[in-house]
Amino acid sequence: MEVKQVLNMALLSGEILLTSGSEIYRVEDTIDRICGAYGIESEAFVTPTGIIISGWAKSNPNDSVSLVKRIRNRTINLHNIEIINTFSRELQQGTLPYDQAMAKLNAVKTAPYFSFFKRLSAAALTAFAYTILFRGTYIDGLCAAIISTLIYSSLEKMKGINFSQYFGNFLCSLAAGLISICAGKLVPLLHVDAIIIGSIMILVPGLAITNGIRDALHGDIVSSQARVVEALIVVTSIGVGVGISLLLMKYWM
């Protein structure tokens, strides 16, 4: 198989991993595994926003190929990460023809995500569970679940029009705070603090923070800093939104 074909496979695998929320070291390891399975020496440099790969045949190190891929969108899809992990390890046991391997990878890349109803249900369940965890009642959990579904639906619509992630988180956290406080004014028995915490949990970038720390432990300092800074900006936008809602309701009600 030609060097460029192997690098195309490795690049597509890395792209799927990175856009699915994988750690940097895992992307680079997968690229090395795929190239090594076909007898290709490679060097990969990966950041949260791009992939650079150079590869050459062991028999002809002077004839190298380099590929670059810009990554603009990232989400969380642990299922895709598991599939690509398995794919790269299976290639080490027995390689596949180029067309067959690319067809398999493209099928993973274009596979439909979980339905909107399932994601909405997961958001509601997450809000309910965290509200109970922070000593809220079942009624508090139900209120948080309703608010969480509303802000999740809003986020999905914002993504459809390429709305700023940070400003979107700010608006959603502001809305969550205002609705929670209004609900607390209407029903004094509700625990507003637990409802707010539960409803904004779907906005918290927990995986991004975890991956940033793991990247730092593996020596990927640049990627670690990028992920941590991104997570801090998201957390700040959420905190500012909730804080403003508390200030507004303090002076208005």
Image: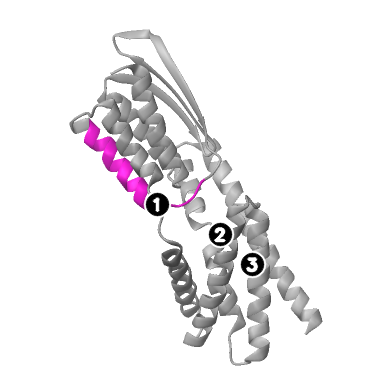
Question: Eyeballing the image, is 186 above or below 242?
Answer: below
How many numbered badges does the structure rendering display? 3
* Residue at the disc numbered 1: 112
Among the two numbered marks 3 and 1 on one chain, the one whose residue lies closer to the N terminus: 1
Q: Residues within 10 Å of mark 2 (few under 14, many from 20)?
A: some
Q: Give yes or no for contact between labels 2 and 3 (Cβ–Cβ under 8 Å).
A: no
Q: Identify the residue at the far right of this view.
A: 251
Q: Which residue is mark 3?
A: 173
Q: Label 3: few (<14), some or many (≥20) within 10 Å? A: many
Task: Report the Cα–Cα distance between label 3 and label 1.
Answer: 28 Å
Type of amino acid under label 3: Ser
Amino acid type shown at disc 2: Glu
Quarter of the rendering containing residue 73? top right
In x, y percent, where is residue 250? 77, 80
Specify start and end residues of the magenta stretch as a single range: 74-91
First reached walking from the N terminus: tag 2 or tag 3: 2
| SS of the residue under disc 2 | helix
Callout in the foreground (3, 1): 1
Q: Is residue 5 left or right of residue 177?
A: left
Q: Residue at x 31, y 41 (%)?
A: 85
Indicate the position of residue 208 as horizontal and vertical percent values.
51, 51
Q: Within 10 Å of the Cα at label 1, are there few (<14), some (14-19), or many (20+) other Cα atoms?
A: few
Residue 89 is one of the magenta-drawn residues: yes
In primary-sequence order, the first of circles 1 and 2 is 1
